Amino acid sequence: MEHFDDFLTAARAQADAQRLLLVFVDIDDAAGGDANEGGFLTPKMCVDKTPDEITSFNDLVAEAANTDQVWSLVFAASLAGKGVQAPTSTDANKPLDAMIAGINTGMIQQYLVFDKQGGILSLTANDEG
């Protein structure tokens, strides 16, 4: 998997219908970091959608631009339903809250992370602080 669109394709191919959990974050460089050096991750907004509600990463970026929120990365996860029934937005509330809490505490290893071009990234938490 190299791009967000690969994630969409994989989610659509699952036997059980999926709901995608997406948290858009910005990198706070108050600690002197930047996207390459590090910094604090600040969740800015979140959304849950079925894979069919997102046609491509470019369309997701265009939709996010309508919010006027500044973001640098997208954290992604998937919630499985049962058969053709995808989880509801209500089902996604607690997992989204858990994602935000995990990002806030540096527990990010279980999520896929994409940059603003949709490329997949590998991040590590820094224990300094």
Image (tube, helix red, strand yellow):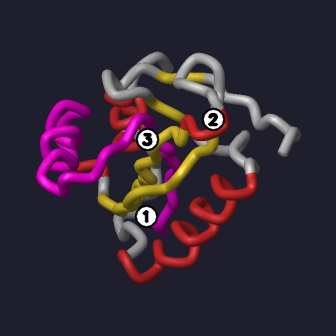
| Amino acid bearing label 3 | Val
Q: Residues within 10 Å of mark 3 (few under 14, many from 20)?
A: many
Residue receiving disc 2: 39
17 to 25, vertically: above or below: below
Q: Earlier in the sequence, mark 2 or mark 1?
A: 2
Which numbered disc, 1 or 3, marks the residue that appears first in the sequence? 3
Query: On the image, numbered disc 3 is attached to which residue?
Result: 74
Up-down: is 81 above or below 56?
below
Quadrant that contains the C terminus: top right
Residue 55 locus on image (x, y percent): 17, 40
Residue at 45% over, 43% down: 26
Q: Which residues are magenta?
A: 54-82
Residue 63 magenta-drawn? yes
Q: Position of residue 108 (x, y in %)?
A: 69, 45
Q: Secondary structure at mark 1?
A: loop
Residue carrying label 1 = 83
Specify the label residue 38 is tagged with: none
Q: Position of residue 88 (x, y in %)?
A: 37, 76
